[in-house]
Amino acid sequence: MTAINVIKKTVVVEPARTAEVASLTWRTLDDGFNRRLRVIVNGAVVLVVEGAEYDALGQWTDDTIKQTILARLGLVEA
């Protein structure tokens, strides 16, 4: 079969996965030139902060990242 062109669109190609979270660990990958911060949570979830949201972080700290993770994932610190 020959490929056909379509208008580009992001589609879900894998069903959503869930995981029970009881603790948080993270590492960050900061790309200041492109105003993009990737936060890898528990080695599985990737949160992307970019553009105006990246600018709003300012000089971020571990507490800033922790608050971002809690807000994005809807978690409450125990």
Image (spheres, rainbow, N blue to C red):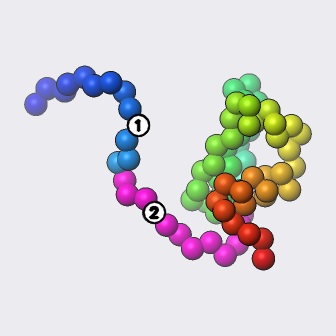
**Rendered location of residue 67, percent (x, y):** 79, 56
Which amino acid does the dot numbered 2 rest on? Arg
Residue span colored magenta: 14-25
Which amino acid does the dot numbered 1 rest on? Thr
Q: Residue at x 70, y 30 (%)?
A: 51
Q: Which mark is residue 10?
A: 1
- Is any part of residue 22 visible from this angle? yes
**Rendered location of residue 64, percent (x, y):** 83, 51
Q: Which mark is residue 29?
A: none
- SS for callout 2: loop
Q: Nearer the viewer, residue 45 or 52?
A: 52
Question: In screen coordinates, is 41 left or right of 32?
Answer: left
**Rendered location of residue 60, percent (x, y):** 86, 44
Q: Nearer the viewer, residue 14 or 43?
A: 14
Residue at the far left in the pictured view: 1
Residue 53 quadrant: top right
Q: Which residue is mark 2?
A: 17
> How many circles with numbers are drawn on the protein?
2
Residue 34 quadrant: top right
Question: In screen coordinates, is 43 left or right of 64?
Answer: left
